[in-house]
Image (cartoon, helix red, strand yellow):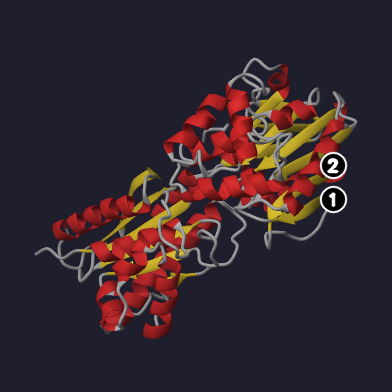
């Protein structure tokens, strides 16, 4: 097996480190491939299907149908088709645009993310029509992953799609955590927050889930359409107040939430609802598998690897400061030439106050670059495992101690870009002027288990 040639210059060394970070990231993606994740979590032996603690006798069902939504749903569907073969009757999933795979018996509808669109509404209507025909002789297999909240969209009575679009945009810009965002979205929907299970009842429902939420809370992932909802209208209203959205939300949205809090709109189904007696939910993959694979790959590249956290959250800038402090402290404690890899993952937030374009990973990377400006031996890759960071074509960015000094030498002020929440423009301009590739662009990956931060640290100590 050939070894990589030792770099002979500073620029070659930087390029090698960046290649290693990309290799580590790709290993993390491979570990959470939706097709293999489903195949590893679900087994079939003749007419018996085994998933989690549940056993399903396929022979007793007259029909087996598949429904679902999410960025990873297409490759999950491929696995289910291969598992069920001729036993599968019908199916329909909603995926983000450009996330489809080869067509099969399970049909695919492309829709918009993160802001819902009419294609998502029409696709959801078709799913609901299919589930309303389900009975006790029907097995429903639901496939859910990150992005499902935007893709599976059916506004509650009296709420328009435009209302949902405006409310979603405000929530995503507010800095609210995903749990808070989804508490509101569930209460503006006729399918989220357990309502899809109600629609399918009395059919048994097996839900296979790719988790993209810290802690894997089932009622938050894709807004929990097949599990009991732990939140109430009062929680949704509290989120609206906490982030100053009362005077900004569409009047129909605010009025609906207030009626719900007053008991004049039906609550989302809770744990005692009979529809949940026939539901099983299995998480087939999540961030921990991705980080474990990243650690193994880093070790294979000669770096001691440490998983710092799988629950990175809060404002992206604050997370960047935390990671930078850890990396700089570690660099000082390592002997010269020693290499360590710090790994983290989770989902930060960005409170958008500027007029720029970016995403939480690009914002984190830019803030991190400012923290380590001029420091040698520290390189960060921060990227979304779905390949899309915010409303951009970048997954994230790679920065090191040279990024900020070089940007300033090229006539750019990184702090100004950061204050305007314009990280995408910063990295685009930086790459154009410097000839580097700080922007990390993968295209759609077909999976989604939150974000990953990979930091290579080389010792600066004696």
Question: Residue 236: in sight, yes or no?
Answer: yes
Q: Nearer the viewer, residue 329 or 171?
A: 171
Callouts 1 and 2 close, C-beta under 8 Å: yes
Report crowding for label 1: few under 14, some 14 to 19, many 20 or more residues within 10 A (C-alpha).
some
The C terminus, quarter of image: bottom left
Q: Residue 84 sits in which quadrant?
A: top right
The structure residue drawn at horizontal position 48% and vertical position 55%, both measured from the top left corner, is 28
Q: How many marks?
A: 2
Q: What residue appears at the point 85 percent right and 23 percent down from the top-left corner?
A: 136
Q: Quadrant of residue 275?
A: top right
Relative image position of residue 339 (x, y in whole percent): 25, 63
Farthest-out residue, right:
62
Q: Residue at x 47, y 65 (%)?
A: 357
Mark 2 residue element = loop
Nearer to the camera, 269 or 237: 237
Percent position of residue 264, x then y: 66, 20
Circle 2 packing at 10 Å, graded few (<14), some (14-19), many (20+), is: some
Marking on residue 88: 2
x and y percentages locating residue 94 in the rendered image: 73, 50
> Mark 1 or mark 2, which has the lower sequence index?
2
Q: Is residue 283 visible?
A: no
Q: Is residue 151 left or right of residue 217?
A: right
Instruction: Measuring from the top left, give residue 250's x and y in whole percent.
Output: 60, 43
Tell me how far mark 1 sits from mark 2, CA to CA: 8 Å
Q: Which mark is residue 193?
A: none
Give me the disc on residue 105: 1
Left or right of residue 424, residue 444 in this image: right
Q: Residue at x 70, y 47 (%)?
A: 161
**Residue closest to the far left:** 462
């Amino acid at each position: 097996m050939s070894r990589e040639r030792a770099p002979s210059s500073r620029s070659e060394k930087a390029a090698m480190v960046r290649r290693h970070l990309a290799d580590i990231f790709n290993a993390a993606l491979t570990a959470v491939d939706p097709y293999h994740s489903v195949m590893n979590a679900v087994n079939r032996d003749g007419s018996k299907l085994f998933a989690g603690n549940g056993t399903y006798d396929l022979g007793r069902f007259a029909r087996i149908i598949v429904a679902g939504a999410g960025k990873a749903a297409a490759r999950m569907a491929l696995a289910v088709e291969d598992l069920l073969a001729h036993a599968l009757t019908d199916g329909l999933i909603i995926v983000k645009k450009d996330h489809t795979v080869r067509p099969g018996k399970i049909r695919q509808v492309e829709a918009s993310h993160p802001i819902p669109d009419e294609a998502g509404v029409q696709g959801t209507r078709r799913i609901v029509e299919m589930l309303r025909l389900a009975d006790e002789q029907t097995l429903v297999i639901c496939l859910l992953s990150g992005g499902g909240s935007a893709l599976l969209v059916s506004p509650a009575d009296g709420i328009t799609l435009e209302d949902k679009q405006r409310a979603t945009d405000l929530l995503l810009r507010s800095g609210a955590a995903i749990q808070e965002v989804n508490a509101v979205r569930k209460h503006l929907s006729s399918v989220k927050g357990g309502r899809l299970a109600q629609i399918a009842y009395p059919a048994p429902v097996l839900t296979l889930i790719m988790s993209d939420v810290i802690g894997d809370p089932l009622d938050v992932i894709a807004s929990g359409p097949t599990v009991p909802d732990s939140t109430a209208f009062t929680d949704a209203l509290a989120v609206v107040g906490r982030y100053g959205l009362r005077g900004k939300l569409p009047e129909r949205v605010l009025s609906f939430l207030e009626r719900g809090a007053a008991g004049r709109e039906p609550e989302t189904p809770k744990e005692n609802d009979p529809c949940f007696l026939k539901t099983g939910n299995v998480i087939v993959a999540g961030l921990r598998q991705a980080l474990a694979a990243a650690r193994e790959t880093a070790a294979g590249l000669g770096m001691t690897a440490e998983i710092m956290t799988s629950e990175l959250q809060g404002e992206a800038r604050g997370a960047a400061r935390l990671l930078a402090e850890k990396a700089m402290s570690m660099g000082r404690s390592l002997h010269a030439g020693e290499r360590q890899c710090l790994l983290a993952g989770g989902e930060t937030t960005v409170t958008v106050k500027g007029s720029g374009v970016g995403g939480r990973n690009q914002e984190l990377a830019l803030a991190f670059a400012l923290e380590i400006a001029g420091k040698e031996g520290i390189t960060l890759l921060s990227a979304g495992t779905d390949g899309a960071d915010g409303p951009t074509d970048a997954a994230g960015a790679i920065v090191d101690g040279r990024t900020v000094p070089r940007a300033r030498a090229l006539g750019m002020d990184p702090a100004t870009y950061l204050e305007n929440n314009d990280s995408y423009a910063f990295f685009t301009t930086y790459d154009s002027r410097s000839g580097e590739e700080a922007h990390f662009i993968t295209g759609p990956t077909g999976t989604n288990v939150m974000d990953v931060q990979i930091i290579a640290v080389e010792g600066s100590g004696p």
